[in-house]
Image: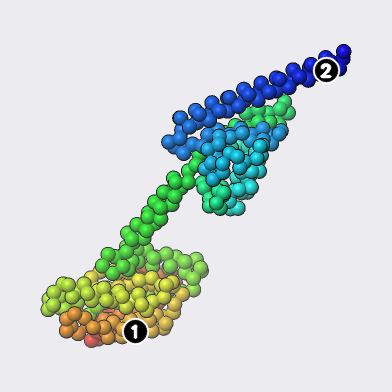
Amino acid sequence: MADTDQQREIDLLKNELAAVKRLNKELLDLQHQQDSLEFSWIGNLGHWFWDLKENKVAFNPMKAESLGFKREELPEYVDFQFFTDRLHPEDYERVMQTMRDHLADKVPVYEVRYRIRSKDGSYKTYYDRGKVTQRSETGEPLFLTGIVFDVTKYEAEKQVLLKANKEWQQISKLDKLTGLLNRTNILVKLGQIISEVNREKRQTVSMILIDIDNLEHQNSLFGPLLGDELIKEAAAVIKEIIQVDYYAGTFEGGKFLIVLPDIKKSKARQIAEQIRVAFNSREFSEPAEVTSSSGVAEYEPSETVSQLFNRADRLLYKAKQNGKNNVLSD
């Protein structure tokens, strides 16, 4: 008799468990339908539920489908590791630490953005937000619920915009005619390098101030288009000769400023001479005799940007007085 009662009790428990499973399935299906109806337009992949004790995760199939999996390809019981094992290596520790902090009740909500590997090996970007909804009497986490969004498209658009913004920022620093830094930004760069020298992050800095000789006279003879041609050609020569870790910019009509970090005056003068010779040997659309002059100065301790610039400018003026087509340094 006792065995019969025990069997009856077992059968009742089985029936109750089956009923609970059916109810859970209906509730989960209903949640999936609500997710699809209410949030699909913003990349929502639905809710997820994680039973920590059993390490079982229930989730909207959209989450797995977005990674390229079909329902029949998933194990009967999906655990937490099914998703964490697919995290991008650079994101793994950050995501896991965020979860650990939330489980330990150090942060009120688990909220993180991460890249996760799809079935085909590509990565998608998810925004995940969840919270412990049940804890034991001792504070041990028992159950979490959350919601996840596929923000891959948003992240791609964001990166495009960031790249475009960076490019526009760079373009805004350049002179439109020559492609060199404009007046403001070459002076800013000179100031930055001088500051680095003063903080002993650099040994020294030299500058070259170049001016196209007789530019106004050439404009009056052949027109302003030739003047533009001379300026662009001078800029092209400068780009060809100076190294990538040097800086060049336009200052005003026909005048150029070159900043040479960690370059002594003697080397700077050699560079200026190379530019003078190369520019003077170029051919132009009009039979103009084209030359240039330069003033070269090396930074002296405690000088301001203006003082260094003025020294180079005075040397340039002296080179002009001495017959032009010349390079002078102090």
Nearer to us of marks 1 and 2 is 2
Badge 1 element: helix
The quadrant the N terminus occupies is top right
Front residue of 189/315: it is 189
Q: Which mark is residue 273?
A: 1
Front residue of 56/294: it is 56
- Residue visible at 23% across and 76% down in the picture: 230
Left-right relation of 262 to 232: right
The quadrant the C terminus occupies is bottom left
Name which of mark 1 and mark 2 comes first in the sequence: 2
Circle 2 crowding by C-alpha within 10 Å: few under 14, some 14–19, many from 20: few
Circle 1 crowding by C-alpha within 10 Å: few under 14, some 14–19, many from 20: some
- Residue visible at 54% across and 39% down in the picture: 63
Q: Could you tell me the amino acid type at mark 2?
A: Gln
Residue 305 horizontal/vertical position (percent): 37, 67
Badge 2 element: helix
Q: Quadrant of residue 212?
A: bottom left
Residue 118 horizontal/vertical position (percent): 55, 48
Marks 1/2: CA distance?
105 Å
Q: Could you tell me the amino acid type at mark 1?
A: Glu
Which residue position holds label 2? 6
Tell me: residue 329, above or below residue 31.
below
Residue 114 horizontal/vertical position (percent): 55, 46
- Residue visible at 46% across and 30% down in the picture: 37
Q: Quadrant of residue 95?
A: top right
- Residue visible at 62% across and 28% down in the picture: 133
Left-right relation of 121 to 326: right
